[in-house]
Amino acid sequence: MGRIACIVVLFAACRPPGYGKHEPDASVDAPAGDARAIDAPVTGCDHAFRLDGHATSSSVWLTGDFTSWAGDPATGAIAFQLGTDGGWTLTHTFAAGTYQYKLIIDGTQWIADPTNPDQVDDGFGGKNSLYTCQP
C-alpha cells in the first residue's frame, strides 16, 4: 500500500503548476473595471501563410527551426491546405520569438517564403525566411 501512495504522490507532483485549476478568461469573466481585463497576457501569435502559383502541386508543407526542420508531416512539418482559388494556406500559432522557416513543395523543393522579404542565409547557398512573434 505504501508503494501505491508513493506513486500517487509522485504522479501528482509531476503535474505542471496550475494543473486542474481553471483561470477565468479575463475578457469574459472579469467585472468591468477589473485590471485583469486590461492586462490579460498574450502568449503567442497566429500567423497566416499563403503560397500562390503552385495550384498543380500535390503538397506544400511548412518546416523550420520550430519543427526541428522536419521534412514531412510524419516527422513534424505542417501541411498547407489547397484552396478553391489555387492558393495554399495555413495558419500556425507561434510562441514569442524569432523563427527561421522554409516551404516544402511536393516533398522535394525547399524554398524561402516568396511573400516574406525577411530572410537570412541558410548556410547552404540559399535563404531561410524569418518570422518574429511579438505578442
Image (cartoon, rainbow, N blue to C red):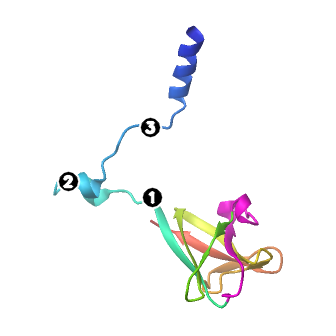
Q: Residue at the spot x=52%, y=72% of the render?
A: 47
Q: What residue did someone put label 1 on?
A: 43
* Residue 95, position as x, y percentages in the image: 53, 60
Q: Residues within 10 Å of mark 3 (few under 14, many from 20)?
A: few
CA distance for labels 2 and 1: 20 Å
The kind of residue on which mark 1 rests is Thr
The magenta segment is 54-76
Determine the image quadrant of residue 111.
bottom right
Q: Nearer the viewer, mark 2 or mark 3?
A: 3
Determine the image quadrant of residue 77.
bottom right
* Residue 68, position as x, y percentages in the image: 71, 60
Front one among 39 and 94: 94
Q: Quadrant of the N terminus?
A: top right
The kind of residue on which mark 2 rests is Asp
Q: Residue at the spot x=52%, y=27% of the render?
A: 13
Q: What residue did someone put label 2 on?
A: 34
Q: Secondary structure at mark 2?
A: loop
Q: Nearer the viewer, mark 1 or mark 3?
A: 3
Q: Which mark is residue 19?
A: 3
CA distance for labels 1 and 3: 18 Å
Front one among 64 and 41: 64
Q: Residue furthest front?
A: 84
The kind of residue on which mark 3 rests is Tyr
* Residue 120, position as x, y percentages in the image: 70, 77
Front one among 48 and 33: 48
Q: Residues within 10 Å of mark 1 (few under 14, many from 20)?
A: few
Dots 2, 1 in contact, CB < 8 A? no
Q: Residue furthest left?
A: 32
Q: Quadrant of the C terminus?
A: bottom left
Q: Is residue 106 above or below residue 94?
A: below
Q: Is residue 79 above or below residue 5?
A: below
CA distance for labels 2 and 3: 24 Å
